[in-house]
Image: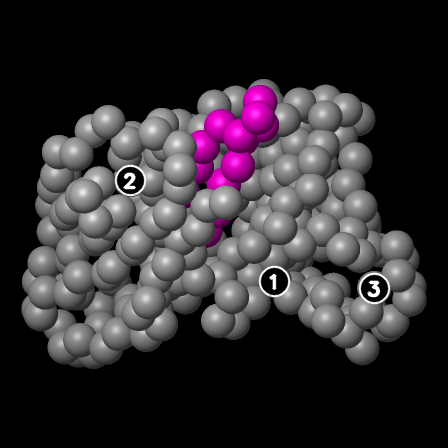
Amino acid sequence: AQKVTQAQTEISVVEKEDVTLDCVYETRDTTYYLFWYKQPPSGELVFLIRRNSFDEQNEISGRYSWNFQKSTSSFNFTITASQVVDSAVYFCALSLDYGGYQKVTFGTGTKLQVIP
Amino acid sequence: EAQVTQNPRYLITVTGKKLTVTCSQNMNHEYMSWYRQDPGLGLRQIYYSMNVEVTDKGDVPEGYKVSRKEKRNFPLILESPSPNQTSLYFCASSPQGSYNEQFFGPGTRLTVL
């Protein structure tokens, strides 16, 4: 069975602070993909990044960075110099091929509030 | 414009009255899925479909039905809705392959009284 844990339910930071959202996953498969999605207050779900299980390189995109560590089964997301527009619910997800089917499991999400 | 559409966006109904939430995508995606979002529980998969006429249960399928007669459409059917099915529902699609990100519809807010 696969599982994604986002232990931080809600986080509040003051604008310009850095913040890290944690994601811990469980799977016995060696090939899998990890994702982060953003859900702003308007409600839509937006894809942010994908990582495959064989690529542990960290990635940076502007103020966003992702740290993937297989040794700790974690795929953490850091926002540097947070802005009010970063306020959203962020979901981590695990995707793998399961007996010919595609299985996707989401975490429970972390609600980030950036206070001006 | 590439998109996933859902209808209706908002629905208030009563216990036991059958309803269907439609989902349509124009990206020729093989994979489609339904999720429900509840506070503290995140997104939970209800049903998914790998292609036409191929569907399977997700994590919370009880009380729901789906069908996939055409590639672009994946309706969610609640034959006898109950108050515990009050939730925010999302349809999603993607090309086949677990490495693909999902494209989500705008969501359907369902209230069952």
Q: Which chain carries label 3?
A: B
Characterize the local packing of mark 1: few (<14), some (14-19) or many (20 or more) Cα atoms within 10 angstroms: some
Residue type at the position of mark 3: Pro
Characterize the local packing of mark 2: few (<14), some (14-19) or many (20 or more) Cα atoms within 10 angstroms: some
**Badge 3 vs badge 1, beta-carbon distance below 8 Å:** no
Q: Name the residue under label 1.
A: B88
Asked which quadrant contains residue A87, the reply is: bottom left
Q: Name the residue under label 3.
A: B81
Q: Mark 1 lies on which chain?
A: B
Asked which quadrant contains residue B81, the reply is: bottom right
Task: Please indicate, yes or no, whether residue A15 appears anywhere in the rendered image.
Answer: yes
Left/right of residue A30 with respect to residue A108 in the rendered view: left
Left/right of residue A73 with respect to residue A38 in the rendered view: left
Does B111 lie within the magenta span? Answer: no
| Residue B72 x/y as whole percent | 67, 27
- Span colored in magenta: A94-106
Q: Name the residue under label 2.
A: A49
